Image (spheres, coloured by chain):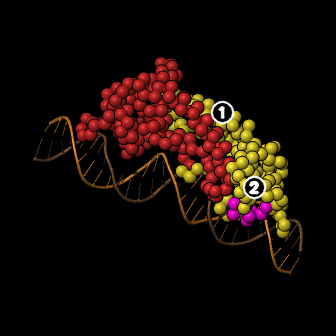
Chain colours: A yellow, B red, C orange, D brown
DNA sequence: TTTTCCGAAACAACAAATGTTACGATATCT
DNA sequence: AGATATCGTAACATTTGTTGTTTCGGAAAA
């Protein structure tokens, strides 16, 4: 299965938007993500609904951040893209009334709940400002903008 | 995408195999899993390669456990089905040399590594015997075999 | 009024597990 | 030996969600 790359892409783009400043068109952002403008609008549209970015149509329009990077956590972006659980326990539903299937599922659910808690902790504490700082450190003087 | 239900199905089936005892045909197991024999052979074949079950062809053949349930952990079954990581961080690969993309990816990788560690801990400590015990407790006197 | 933009619908491409059919190999039973 | 029951395996269809693509319409600015 192709992994869902929307979260990584949005983190990537949001940091670039801050570093570059100003408004960015979907076309321009699509180049950053090596994809096309419609895909960009789909994901950024979800972020707009959660107050992370703002969009404006018409000539000179485009996208810009609605908050500063230190006010956006990874969890904010994740939630904008997907309200539900981050991890889904790979349970089976072949015989929902079978006590054995239920027991096996409950063990998996418990394990995944613990894993998700770990993820949530990381996502909650990590802001986009921190990602930007890592990027700048990695860059070592190379240009980060594109 | 459809979640990968092989682990849950195998846990389910292995416990049933112990409770029922003796050899089980793929056909019989397929009924437990509400699927068909070929799907069963695919997954159980992987478990056989890891010494969890044994198979025998020909009339009277079928599948049986190669170890007792308390010698099989959830991790053993997981590893038999899939050697690789259990969780895969949803990173992007749009511009692999971009420091910003790398920074975003590294944050996700770190979070997922922590989550996977949590999963591994649970998977390592949980044996199929424990799942069987939970199932029997849940059953409360109902029949667990089918 | 023309040019840029986003918004949204519609549909194809793709990936991975699952479902299904079919046939060969092998072991057991009569 | 021949019939029967099983696994082993190949080949292909189905399913489901993300991604990619085309094509409009609408709005804002020049």
> Is residue A135 located in the magenta-colored stretch of the structure?
no
Residue B2 visible? The answer is: yes
In the image, B112: left or right of C15? Answer: right
User: Residue B146 in the image: x percent, y percent?
Assistant: 41, 29
Q: Identify the subunit bearing mark 2.
A: A
User: Percent from the top left, x then y, of residue B136?
Assistant: 48, 21
Left or right: A136 in relation to A66: left
Q: Is disc 1 placed on a helix, strand or loop?
A: helix
Task: Identify the magenta region.
Answer: A24-32
**Helix or strand or loop: what does disc 2 sit on?**
helix
Sequence-wise, the earlier of marks 1 and 2 is 2
Residue A28 placed where, x, y %?
Answer: 74, 64
Residue at the image point whose x is 69% and y is 63% from the top:
A31
What residue is pinned by disc 2? A16
Above/below status of C2 relative to B115: below
Q: Between residue A22 and residue A146, name the one nearer to us.
A: A146
Q: Main secondary structure of the magenta part?
A: helix
Q: Position of residue B15 (x, y in %)?
A: 43, 28
In screen coordinates, is A133 left or right of B135?
Answer: right
- Are circles 1 and 2 on residues that touch, CB within 8 Å? no
Residue A80 visible to the viewer: no
Residue at 64% x, 39% y is: B111
> Is residue A30 a member of the stretch shown in magenta?
yes
Q: Which residue is mark 1?
A: A117
Indicate left or right for A142 with B72 as reference. Answer: right
Residue A12, numbered label: none
Classed neighbour count for the residue bearing mark 1: other residues with Cα under 10 Å, few (<14), some (14–19), many (≥20): some
């Amino acid at each position: 299965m192709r992994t869902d790359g929307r979260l990584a892409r949005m983190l990537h783009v949001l940091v670039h938007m801050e570093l570059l400043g100003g408004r960015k068109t979907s076309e321009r952002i699509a180049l950053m993500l090596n994809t096309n403008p419609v895909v960009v609008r789909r994901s950024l549209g979800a972020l707009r609904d959660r107050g992370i970015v703002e969009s404006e149509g018409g000539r000179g329009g485009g996208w810009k951040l609605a908050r500063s990077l230190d006010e956006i956590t990874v969890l904010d972006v994740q939630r904008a893209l997907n309200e539900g659980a981050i991890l889904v326990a790979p349970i089976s539903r072949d015989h929902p009334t079978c006590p054995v299937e239920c027991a096996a599922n409950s063990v998996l659910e418990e394990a995944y709940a613990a894993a998700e808690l770990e993820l949530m902790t990381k996502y909650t504490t990590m802001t986009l400002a921190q990602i930007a700082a890592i990027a700048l450190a990695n860059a070592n003087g190379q240009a980060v903008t594109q």
